[in-house]
Structures are given as structure tokens and as C-alpha cells.
């Protein structure tokens, strides 16, 4: 049974959440993200071209100095290791990275940009130091 988009059930008329899309639309987006997740996450974390990152350094220094220095490909593989999905709040997830609309900014164009949220502290468990 195909779930149709019902414009009357949209939480906020100014934006749309993934859970408000029809099931076939959700499946198309999830399939695209699954097929391209390595490239997307590599673009976010590594970049491209002459200045592409080769390493990622994470430092935590509240009470103790803790750090992790990892090759960027290990970091990328860590963050794409989970499945592509839709969260309960209606955002997309590529592995361990949540994608959401930036919002805020008093309606400026930048509010339409995407945010990619991840927890860099997860890398301490992968660290070799």
C-alpha cells in the first residue's frame, strides 16, 4: 500500500520532514543516500582536491587531556558503518551522521542549508594512542 503525501498532516507548512513524504519518495531518497553515502561522507569530512584532509584529530581537554589522531579513511568508514535511515524526528541519517535542515537565521537563505551532525568523541574508541 502506497502512502500518499497528505498536505493536511504536515507539522509546519514552511518545511517538510522526511516522515511526511510518501513512502515511495522516502525509498527513493534512502536509496540515493545508500548508493552515495561514501562519497557524501568523504566530501563532508575529507573534502576534495589539493587540500583534502588525510587525517582527523579530535581533542578533549576538560579534566584530562585526551586525543585521537586517525587516518581519514578509517574515520569515514566508522561514520558510514551504520545503515541509512530516517529518524523519529523526520531527519535522514547516513550511518552515524544525522542530516537536518539548518533552520533559524530569521528566514534568511542560510536557513535552507543542511547541517551534518556527528559525535567526534566516538573516535576515541578507535584511537591507536
Image (cartoon, rainbow, N blue to C red):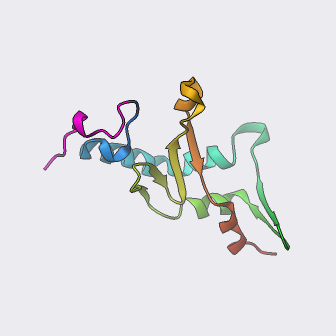
Q: Is residue 88 left or right of residue 22?
A: right
**Residue 8 forms part of the magenta stretch:** yes
Q: Is residue 17 left or right of residue 10?
A: right
Q: Label the magenta part by its dominant secondary structure.
A: loop
- Residue plotted at (19% across, 45% down): 3
Which residue is more in the foreground, 5 or 24?
Answer: 5
- Residue plotted at (79% across, 40% down): 51
The picture places residue 17, in percent across and down from the top left corner, at 38, 42
Which residue is more in the foreground, 32 or 90?
Answer: 90
Which residue is more in the foreground, 45 or 19?
Answer: 19
Q: Is residue 123 left or right of residue 16?
A: right
Name the quadrant containing residue 78: bottom right
Q: Farthest residue to the front: give it.
A: 106
Q: Is residue 47 left or right of residue 86?
A: right
The picture places residue 106, in percent across and down from the top left corner, at 57, 28
Q: Is residue 111 above or below residue 20?
A: above
- Residue plotted at (55% across, 51% down): 38
**Residue 95 forms part of the magenta stretch:** no
Magenta residues span 1-13
Q: Farthest residue to the left: give it.
A: 1
- Residue plotted at (67% across, 63% down): 74
Amino acid at each position: 500500500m502506497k502512502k500518499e503525501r497528505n498536505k493536511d498532516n504536515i507539522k509546519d507548512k514552511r518545511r517538510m520532514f522526511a516522515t511526511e513524504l510518501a513512502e515511495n519518495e522516502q525509498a527513493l531518497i534512502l536509496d540515493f543516500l545508500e548508493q552515495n553515502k561514501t562519497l557524501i561522507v568523504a566530501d563532508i569530512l575529507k573534502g576534495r582536491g589539493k587540500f583534502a584532509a588525510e587525517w582527523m584529530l579530535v581533542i578533549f581537554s576538560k579534566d584530562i587531556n585526551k586525543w585521537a589522531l586517525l587516518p581519514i579513511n578509517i574515520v569515514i568508514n566508522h561514520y558510514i558503518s551504520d545503515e541509512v535511515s530516517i529518524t523519529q524526528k523526520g531527519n535522514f541519517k547516513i550511518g552515524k551522521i544525522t542530516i537536518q535542515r539548518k533552520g533559524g537565521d530569521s528566514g534568511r537563505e542560510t536557513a535552507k542549508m543542511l547541517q551534518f551532525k556527528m559525535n567526534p568523541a566516538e573516535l576515541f574508541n578507535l584511537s591507536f594512542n
